Amino acid sequence: MNVTSSEFKISAVGPAQYPVDGLQEIALAGRSNVGKSSLINRLLRRKNLARTSSVPGKTQHMNYYLINQSFFFVDFPGYGFAKVSKQQREVWGQMIERYMLEREPLKLVLMVVDLRHPPSKDDVMMYEWLTHYDRPICVVTTKADKVPKTRWQKHAKVIKQDLGMRPGDPFVMFSSETDMGKEELWKIIEDHLGELKTLDQRAAEAEAESEATAYAQEDAIEEETAE
């Protein structure tokens, strides 16, 4: 993917704030402090577009990032952080569940886990929920540079087994420090996105369709008048 432009677009707390332009979306889900912001920044070749924080639970909305004027990354609030109130966690859970079930432009969920550690209970629950509703998933394991290369496959095996991964779901080991997995992940994202159209292209098509409809209506009126 040749990223020519990227920008933060909106923080959404529900359907009323979701973009209505019909652009395709790639969602990122994972526990707090797993490295989703660093993953986004590395993929987009930006240093601080997605703000990283040493305070887990900092992201409290669904953050939309517009890429090449043609699709979105949607960064979910991190789950599993104990200092966030139970009520807040329930609100986040309902927001994410509704999005996952109802959001038509959603094409792929990047489920982000830490390669250094076995999946948490929240990770397992998220994966089971996504597979139950047959959402398209790619498991991305971050911080691969912090694990010795000789132990990569051992750690990957534990994560796959603990999640109960389906054979067809892609699995990518990623490092925001070394670019490991970057091209592989972009290929998976592109395969799920399919044909991309920019906002300008969509607007032009909508205008052309509107004009065609208007001409057809005028022709119909003229035929009725002639009769």
Image (cartoon, grey):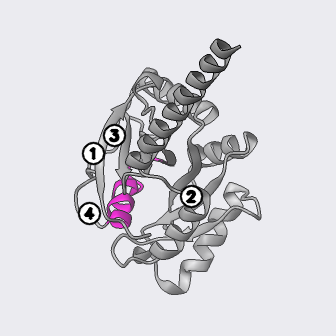
Residue shown at the point (48%, 40%) measured from the top left: 208
Nearest to viewer (mark 2 / mark 1) = 2
Question: Which label's residue is closer to the chain start, 2 or 3?
Answer: 3
Per the image, label 2 sits on a secondary structure element best described as loop
Q: Is residue 28 magenta?
A: yes
Identify the disc placed on residue 89.
Answer: none
Tag 1: amino acid? Val
Task: Report how far apart the C-alphas of labels 2 and 1 lie in the structure.
Answer: 38 Å
Question: Can residue 151 be seen from the camera position used here?
Answer: yes
Outermost residue toward the left in this view? 48
Q: Quadrant of residue 227?
A: top right
Identify the disc placed on residue 55.
Answer: 1
Nearest to viewer (mark 3 / mark 4) = 4
Tag 2: amino acid? Glu
Nearest to viewer (mark 2 / mark 4) = 2
User: For mark 2, does the 10 Å Cα neighbourhood hold few (<14), some (14 to 19), or many (20 or more) residues?
Assistant: few
Question: Which label's residue is closer to the chain start, 2 or 1?
Answer: 1
Per the image, label 3 sits on a secondary structure element best described as loop
- Residue 196: image location, x then y, percent: 51, 56
Question: Which label's residue is closer to the chain start, 3 or 4?
Answer: 4
- Residue 194: image location, x then y, percent: 59, 59
**Which residue is tagged 4?**
46
User: For mark 4, does the 10 Å Cα neighbourhood hold few (<14), some (14 to 19), or many (20 or more) residues?
Assistant: some
**Which residue is tagged 3?**
59
- Residue 163: image location, x then y, percent: 67, 55
- Residue 148: image location, x then y, percent: 46, 82
Q: Is residue 103 magenta?
A: no
Question: Can residue 118 be seen from the camera position used here?
Answer: no
Give the quarter of the figure containing the N terminus.
bottom left
